[in-house]
Image (cartoon, rainbow, N blue to C red):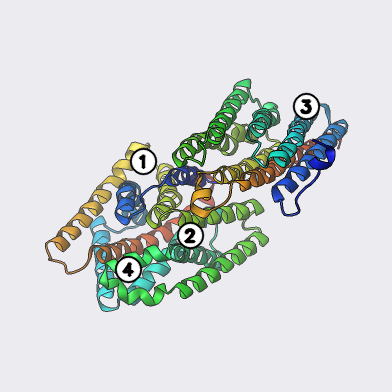
Amino acid sequence: MTKATFIFISFLLLTLTLISGGYDASLSGQLIITTPFLLILGIPHGAIDNVLFLRNKKIKHVHFIVGYLLFVSLNVVLWTAAPLIAYLIFLVISAFHFGQSQFCHYFNKQTFVAKLLFFFWGSTLLSGLLYLNYNETQIIMDLYKEFDQFRVLHRKIGLLYFFSVSVSLTIIFTVILTYKRLLTIENMFMEFLVLTLILSAFYLLPLLIGFTLYFIILHAFKVMREEYHFLKIEQQIVSLRGFISLVAPFTVISIVGILILFGCIYSNLVNLSYGYSLLIAFSSITLPHAYVMNGFYLLTYNKQYSANMK
Amino acid sequence: MTLLEVLIIPKDDAVAFTFFTGYMAMLAASIFFFFERGRVSDKWKLSLLVSALITFIAAVHYYYMRDYYLATGENPTALRYIDWTLTVPLMCVEFYLLTKAAGAKIGLLWKLIVASVWMLVAGYIGEAFNPEGGDTSHSVLWGFLSTIGYIYILYTAWFGEVAKLAEASNNAVVKKGVRTLAWFVLVGWAIYPIGYMCMPGGWLNTSFGWGSENVDLFYNIADAINKIGFGLVVYSIAISSTKEEKA
């Protein structure tokens, strides 16, 4: 069990007891609870992509930022020209990224089967989230007219089919990797338990609270812990304080960026709904982040680092 | 009450069924652990005795609980918690005995006992003093407090002192044993809250309509898994270690 898993289980148990006390599960109530966690812990986990990417590369910082903004702009163009394709790409990349983050510490080398496991674990997570909270997602989609074009991907029967296939393939690939001795039997059972708990959280808790619990603890906290250990090994930081000052600038910039975006929508400079523009913003942040993290995992879980990263 | 009356078990009463099988299984396990003590080396005899005591104490309580349940049809809450107040700290003693050779101090034992008693007392108040018809806020408050005790033990078993001592022991058998017991705490002990939330006013009771008869069903299943399973793990460690010493 990783420390992130322990914290997740602890928070899940405590949250379940509290939620059972009759918490008002309205969307606005959920946003009030989850937004601070997403801002304080969610955004920082991707706020040092520049540091991780530029390591040992002869690329200037400014060039990285220009390239990053170019990538974001292309993504926004894609969202404008072909929103359904952009949305699909976002889901596929997110699924792989979540799965990679969950399993990366087990493997020194990411085989093809391991990559399949990453994707299908992540797709179990996303399809499970949408299927197990079907009514809530429909309410959210009804709020914003732009989401109508994605309804084809959100049919209940389709989600159930994709969820079932993803769960089955996740189990099969996990068993294959255990059979090949790339995972231990204990690892396999732990991962099955964790996935069961995540899906239980999605089913039992309101949509945003369930997802935030997973995202903040099992994903963002785990990634930040790995980044912290990596930077310490690399002697780029010496303490937690150093890490915080490293993640702070881009965290603040991201939050300010979201506020500016909301300001533009409020003053009718951008003719999009808040929900839809947030989706585009998250997609624009996620795609380059997933790319950088893929390189980070390939680097960190080789023999040189793995002993100190787990 | 005649013996014949006591032995009538309704065919569809899973709770009564598990009370009887639980009683016999606990008793059988106690006899097994008592007799097997003779086969293990001296350093493991105390651990096996504790395992036997855990299942024996449970067997005695199950003897009374099954009769109480059949006579009244109610949950034997007080008997249940008297049993747990004795057996759960004894399970903590097993952790201490396993890691003692690696330097575990008596303070570790006390910390685990305090956490387990905290967990049980909070659970008892939540269950026994639940107002007639059930009160969700009462159940939530005491369930939350009880969970804190559980999380402390879970942490100690997986990352804290127990885990560190097992790692430091450099003994593969002890490491594997402690890890297996930690799994029992993680999965086996987690069955109890499911039973707790079935009582009137509990979440599973109010939100999913799970009746209060399920409280004892889940508790009986959890007891069988945890008490006998816990003992069997200790037994397996003792046998493996004894074999290694003889080799």
The amino acid marked with disc number 2 is Gln
Residue drawn at x 44%, y 64% is A126
Q: Residue A100 got which mark? A: 2
- In which quadrant of the rendered view does residue A263 lie? bottom left
Mark 1 and mark 2: Cα distance apart in space: 25 Å
Q: Are marks 3 and 2 on the same chain?
A: no
* Residue type, mark 4 in image: Met
Which residue occupies the foreground of this view, B42 or A129?
A129
Instruction: Determine whether A272 is above or below A82 in the image.
Output: above
Dot label at residue A141 = 4
Residue type at numbered disc 3? Leu
Q: Residues within 10 Å of mark 3 (few under 14, many from 20)?
A: few
Q: CA distance from mark 4 to mark 2?
A: 29 Å
- Camera-side residue: B41 or B19? B19
Q: Chain of mark 3?
A: B
**Residue found farthest to the top:** B106
Give the image location of residue B42, x and y in percent.
82, 26
* Quarter of the figure with the N terminus of chain B: top right
